[in-house]
Image (cartoon, coloured by chain):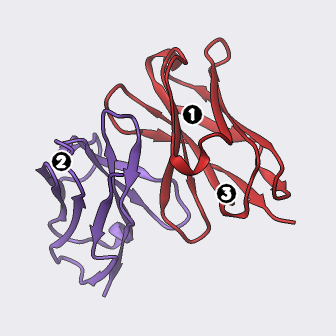
Amino acid sequence: EVQLVESGGGLVQPGGSLRVSCAASGFTFTNYWMSWFRQAPGKGLEWVAHIKQDGSEKYYVDSVKGRFTVSRDNAKNSVSLQMNSLRAEDTAVYYCARAPEARPSDSWGQGTLVIVSS
Amino acid sequence: DLQMTQSPSSLSASVGDRVTITCRASQGISNYLGWYQQKPGKVPKLLIDAASTLQSGVPSRFSGSGSGTDFTLTITSLQPEDVATYYCLNYNTARTWTFGQGTKVEIK
């Protein structure tokens, strides 16, 4: 069974940093791109970032470029999102998901809530 | 930047009705279009990819069509369990993905 379990969410002040992580199991991790999505309270879905199977390619939505960094540890079957210079508008549930090559994400974790507030 | 325009933003229909949701891309995206269903308080679920490929286990009353810039998600006979918000997603080869704004489907 595919499992994706996010952790690391919480309350952080504007301008602060937070690292959210995702532990994957039940599938061959190195066969998949890994993605982060987010959903602000009462709002729609937004793609945030991707990382390729070997970590050689990373892509970000414009609003987080230069502030967020996605990484993966294939030995530990995990993917992380380092979030710096956080803003109130980054408040959201952050989901990790796997994506087969050239296909959309087909399995998502349950999400972790990040609140940016003073 | 590529934009995905989804319509309507919400709809209310009766059980058994045919429901159609459209998604328009601001530029051609071939068939790199997926549809997700998100029930209240739940994680998004992939229903369709490649514009028209139904995922395993998804009821056959769901179907997708389109290519290029115009896409459609159809529910042929709306059921109470289909109450959800539906999102289209462009997953193009440039590796930057864009969602539509979502369509909230309710039962009349």
User: Relative to the observer, which residue lies in front, B60 or A107?
Assistant: A107
User: Relative to the observer, which residue lies in front, B3 or B79?
Assistant: B3
Q: Which mark is residue A3?
A: 1
> Is there any visible trace of residue B56 in the rendered image?
yes
Marks 2/3 same chain? no
Colour used to depict chain A in the structure image: red
User: Relative to the observer, which residue lies in front, B95 or B102?
Assistant: B95
CA distance for labels 1 and 2: 34 Å
Q: Is residue A21 left or right of residue B10?
A: right
Residue occupying the point 52% across, 19% down: A29
Chain at tag 1: A
> Is there any visible trace of residue A23 in the rendered image?
no
Tell which chain the image draws in purple.
B
CA distance for labels 2 and 3: 30 Å
Q: Is residue A10 above or below residue A60?
A: below
Q: Which mark is residue B28?
A: 2
Q: Position of residue A28 (x, y in %)?
A: 49, 17
**Tag 2 secondary structure:** loop
Q: Amino acid at mark 3?
A: Asp
Residue occupying the point 65% across, 34% down: A69
**Residue pointed to by mark 3:** A90
Residues tagged 1 and 3 counted as in contact (Cβ below 8 A): no
Q: Amino acid at mark 2?
A: Gly
